[in-house]
Amino acid sequence: MKFADLHLHTQFSDGTFTPEELAGHGSRLGFAALALTDHDTVEGCARMAAACTAAGIEFIPGAELTAEYNDTELHILGYFLDTHNPKLLAEIAKFQAVRQNRIREMVARINEMGVPLEADTVFALANCKSPGRPHVARAMVKAGLVSHLDEAFERFLKKNRPAWVPKKKVSALEAIELVHQAGGLAVMAHPGLNRTDEIIPALVNVGLDGIECFHTKHSTATSERYLEIAEKFNLLITGGSDCHGFSKGKPLIGGIKLPYEHVEKMKQVVAARQSSPVTRL
Ligand code: AMP
Ligand code: ZN
Ligand code: FE
Ligand code: FE
């Protein structure tokens, strides 16, 4: 039986593994295919592709784009992306500029609360173009300002806490279009975490291709609910661990093993589009 993990992060966003480390874990765990889905970047894809090829693993270039629908944040996964697509890269540059300014704003607010942290400390730790709250939290732990990551989120960084600053978001419709024009498949990430099922039909109408039924934080009942929704709307079924590194002493990759038949179906849709591109009414 062949398996895939289609939701993975590296140091190119808020993951802690390098692409090579991640591919190494994937190889040890026997994965046939891996997709890299860093937040608002495709920068790690070239190294991940090389590392996967060296390990005999099929690689799918992807990204996890920050989107919104009716003021609710949701994440759109793009798969089989052309990582050189100019429009995609232009939009990613905008996401990253906002993410970098946001680090400065979050640090300023933390300082206003009397906690000494420097933005450059966070940037040095993040060492990537797509920094996020986990980097702020890790810098705070490292500096001894909080005792663990959760404390940083609970006291400062969670939505509606004093240092929370919004990110750039594109509408879910724009995210889907952006993925499509870059040759990719657009998939709704971890719907069970967003509790926004009512928007799925509207996203299907604008071309959503799939739904992430299997995710580390989905219970069996949640996965089953989304499998039913996928069948109802004729959506592709995807799944992944959403590994950002170690969790409870071991790498999170390995917890979700998506049967490879779902990757086959994704590839069939990509191939069909390449031979006759979709025109939408
Ligand atoms: P950002 O993209 O900057 O808004 O940060 C979102 C990321 O923060 C998510 O992808 C998770 O990796 C991480 N995250 C969210 N909540 C927590 C938490 N309570 N503890 C640790 N990490 C979290
Ligand atoms: Zn993340
Ligand atoms: Fe996400
Ligand atoms: Fe994620």
Image (spheres, rainbow, N blue to C red):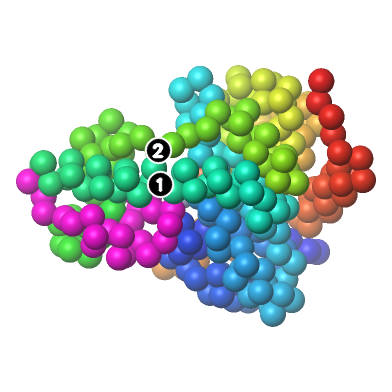
> Helix, strand, or loop for circle 1?
helix
Mark closest to the chain's N terminus, 1 or 2: 1
- Can the viewer see residue 222? no
Magenta region: which residues? Answer: 114-135
Amino acid carrying label 2: it is: Lys
Can residue 118 be found in the magenta stretch? Answer: yes
> Helix, strand, or loop for circle 2?
loop
Q: Position of residue 34 (x, y in %)?
A: 67, 62
Which is nearer the eye, 71 or 226?
71
Q: Position of residue 276 (x, y in %)?
A: 91, 40
Q: Position of residue 166 (x, y in %)?
A: 36, 35
Which is nearer the eye, 222 or 155?
155
The label shown at residue 167 is: 2
Q: Is residue 121 above or below residue 197?
A: below
Mark nearest the camera among 1 and 2 is 1
Q: Which residue is mark 1?
A: 97
CA distance separating discs 1 and 2: 10 Å
Residue drawn where x is 40% and y is 38% of the image:
167
Which is nearer the eye, 40 or 220?
40
Give the residue at the far bottom of this rendering: 54
